[in-house]
Image: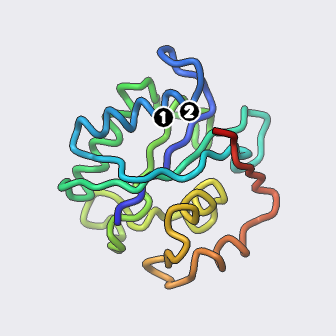
Amino acid sequence: MIFLGVGANLPSPSFSSPRETLEAAVRDLGRAGVVARAVSRWYETAPVPMSDQPWYVNAVYRVETDLDPVRLLEVLHRVESDYGRVRGEVNGPRVIDLDLLDYRGLCRDGAEGGPVLPHPRLHERAFVLLPLCDLAPGWKHPRSGASIDSLIAELDPEQAAHVLGS
């Protein structure tokens, strides 16, 4: 399975809420051959690290594609750019963030170019693990073999997250 994390905490010029931006971006991914098959619940999450920027809206999608991980990451970055993402401040506010979390359990260190897989910080982030657990409660970290439940139990309690209504 392939899992994508989506998040935003700023409105985009074309949509009234971060969630609407993210849902539109996922539809555009479908037109690029990245088809959403399932989505987690939506979460409102505190910025990591904690700061005074707005809270994020996050979800995880299970997708299907014939694209390899390198090409998939290129498509994610192109869609982010199309929606106004400007890469600048690390952990800064953003109108869209599309992350390749897990590509069929593949482990890559990035030395050969392309994405590090699984995403190098996914095991440390409530905004990834909680929605991923909604979709794949039996998921295990491809590198460590740790269960998603054990990873969630180890999260810093300051990583506040709550489920948003539909």
- Is 108 left or right of 158, judged from the image as shown? left
The residue under label 2 is which amino acid type?
Answer: Arg
Estimate the spatial distance between the alpha carbons at disc 2 and disc 1, rounded to whole Å: 5 Å
Where does label 2 land, which residue?
Answer: 19
Q: Amino acid at mark 1?
A: Leu
Single out the residue that lies furthest toward the left: 66
Other residues around mark 2 within 10 Å, as few (<14) / some (14–19) / many (≥20): many
- Is 106 drawn above or below residue 69 in the view shown? below
Residue at 74 percent across and 49 percent down: it is: 162
Q: Residue furthest top?
A: 13
Could you say which is closer to the camera, residue 94 or residue 2? 2
* Category of crowding for the residue at label 1, using alpha-carbon neighbours closer than 10 angstroms: few (below 14), some (14–19), many (at least 20): many
Q: Kindly identify the residue that appears in the image at 35 percent across and 34 percent down.
A: 27
Disc marking residue 53: none
Residue drawn at the location 41% of the way across and 58% of the way down: 3
**Circles 2 and 1: CB atoms closer than 8 Å:** yes
The x, y position of residue 148, in whole percent, is: 58, 74
